[in-house]
Image: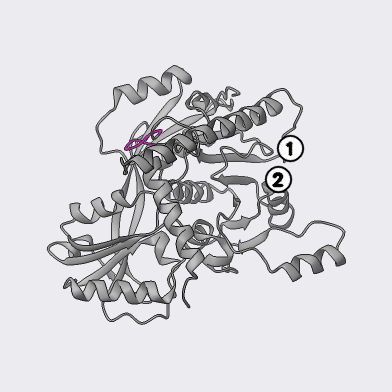
């Protein structure tokens, strides 16, 4: 299977756009394109502000479902390390006796065929149910059908329901009705206003909190920085353990008194694809590694490998959620052989997009990451207790945007 000429051009344009947004290009063409994107960001800002205004003044209404709703999200697009936080948070809730469902929109998942959707519309009066990625016992969809993050969460969280639907009110009602769930976790749900969270957990990437400060498409912000005030708790992710007084002051300016929970994403082990083989992290020390990934922040992944002692002799970066084809794998193996690599390493998120039965002439591993709380709570379990089971039974304050 190979990519079409048009698809390659679209991918190239997307990569160029990302480079302009992140300031990786400084030529005249990038400046002109950046100005054009800046004009579009005014339009995006107006639409976003209007939407929040309509909900704030009850012209548009959220729809309560009568159970605990926890929203995990961010102000920016991609790259805050959200999925490991959702995973560990859902596991902690489950261990405390909650019946948990994770609701995702299934970003870049493959929609059902048109004929199936037409057939459903002709034979049913109601909307189709959400796609069930996991019923708590069995994984029912692959990563292409479910989306990368929902599939990862389903694979790593036995006993937790994972549903995909753009209409998360419908998905939440379905989780309650069919599976008896009493807790809904909205993955990447900070901008999903129809289902109001009792708790809004906002993730901020300490290495790049708000990009260049512009809204999409000139920057990486989905909504203005002042909307920090909508958060019940703020998780500072990708921390190196050092405090950032300026960032903390900015957050407190917009949301006085909000609790800050600082955390880091720690590498745990290397898992070989298509095998039960697992290697400790010191396996990388001194090894010649060819790294590749299709994530929002490839720099952080590559830094993990270098910090673990790997010699990065080759690297390839793809678009976030890039769907690999056979010629990509052939090219990666050729590059690795040419550079004398001992193995290939990718991310767990990329690994779900690689066929498990594909044969590799060099070992291919993915790096498993987990969340560790550094400040704001003694451990993650304590953080969950503080957030979802407050001593006085009161609801943490949430200020409307």
| Depth order, front residue of 274/379 | 274
Q: Position of residue 283 (x, y in %)?
A: 19, 65
Q: Can I make out residue 94 in this image? A: yes
Q: Tell whether 105 sits left or right of 231.
A: right
Span shown in magenta: 205-210
Magenta segment's dominant SS is loop
- Residue 288 is a magenta residue: no
> Can you tell which mark lies on residue 207?
none
Check if mark 2's residue and mark 1's residue have beta carbons within 8 Å: yes
> Can you tell which mark lies on residue 63?
1
- Residue 207 is a magenta residue: yes
Q: Position of residue 154 (x, y in %)?
A: 52, 61
Instruction: Identify the residue position indicated by label 2 in the image.
Output: 169
| Depth order, front residue of 15/145 | 15
Q: Tell whether 133 sits left or right of 307.
A: right
| Depth order, front residue of 317/255 | 317
In the image, residue 398 sits, relative to residue 326, either above or below, namely above
């Amino acid at each position: 299977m190979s990519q079409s000429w048009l698809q390659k051009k679209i991918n190239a344009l997307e990569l160029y756009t990302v480079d302009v947004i992140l300031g990786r290009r400084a030529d005249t063409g990038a400046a002109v394109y950046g100005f054009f994107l800046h004009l579009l960001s005014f339009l995006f800002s107006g639409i976003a502000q209007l939407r929040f205004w309509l909900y704030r003044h009850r012209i548009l209404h959220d729809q309560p479902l009568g159970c605990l709703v926890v929203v995990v999200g961010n102000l920016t697009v991609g790259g805050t390390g959200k999925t490991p936080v959702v995973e560990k948070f859902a596991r902690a809730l489950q261990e405390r006796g909650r019946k948990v469902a994770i609701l995702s929109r299934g970003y870049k998942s493959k929609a059902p065929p048109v004929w199936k959707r037409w057939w459903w519309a002709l034979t049913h009066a109601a909307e189709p149910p959400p796609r069930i990625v996991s019923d708590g016992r069995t994984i029912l969809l692959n990563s292409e059908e479910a989306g990368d993050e929902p599939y990862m969460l389903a694979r790593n969280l036995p006993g937790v329901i994972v549903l995909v639907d753009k209409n998360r009110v419908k998905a939440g009602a379905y989780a309650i009705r069919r599976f008896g769930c009493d807790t809904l976790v909205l993955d990447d749900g900070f901008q999903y206003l129809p289902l109001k969270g009792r708790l809004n957990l906002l993730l901020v990437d300490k290495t790049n909190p708000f990009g260049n400060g512009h809204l999409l498409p000139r920057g990486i912000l989905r909504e203005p920085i002042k909307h920090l005030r909508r958060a019940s708790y703020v998780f500072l992710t990708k921390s190196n353990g050092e405090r950032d007084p300026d960032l903390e002051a900015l957050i407190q300016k917009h949301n006085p008194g909000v609790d800050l929970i600082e955390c880091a994403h720690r590498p745990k082990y290397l898992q070989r694809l298509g095998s039960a083989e697992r290697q400790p992290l010191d396996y990388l020390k001194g090894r010649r590694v060819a790294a590749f990934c299709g994530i929002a922040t490839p720099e952080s992944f590559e830094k993990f490998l270098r910090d673990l002692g790997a010699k990065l002799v080759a690297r390839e970066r793809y678009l976030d959620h890039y769907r690999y084809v056979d010629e990509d794998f052939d090219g990666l193996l050729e590059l690795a052989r040419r550079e004398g690599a001992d193995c290939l390493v990718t991310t767990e998120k990329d690994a779900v997009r690689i066929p498990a039965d594909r044969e590799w002439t060099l070992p291919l591993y993915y790096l498993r990451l987990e969340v560790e709380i550094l400040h704001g709570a003694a451990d993650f379990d304590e953080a969950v207790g503080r957030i979802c089971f407050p001593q006085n039974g009161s609801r943490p304050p949430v200020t409307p945007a």
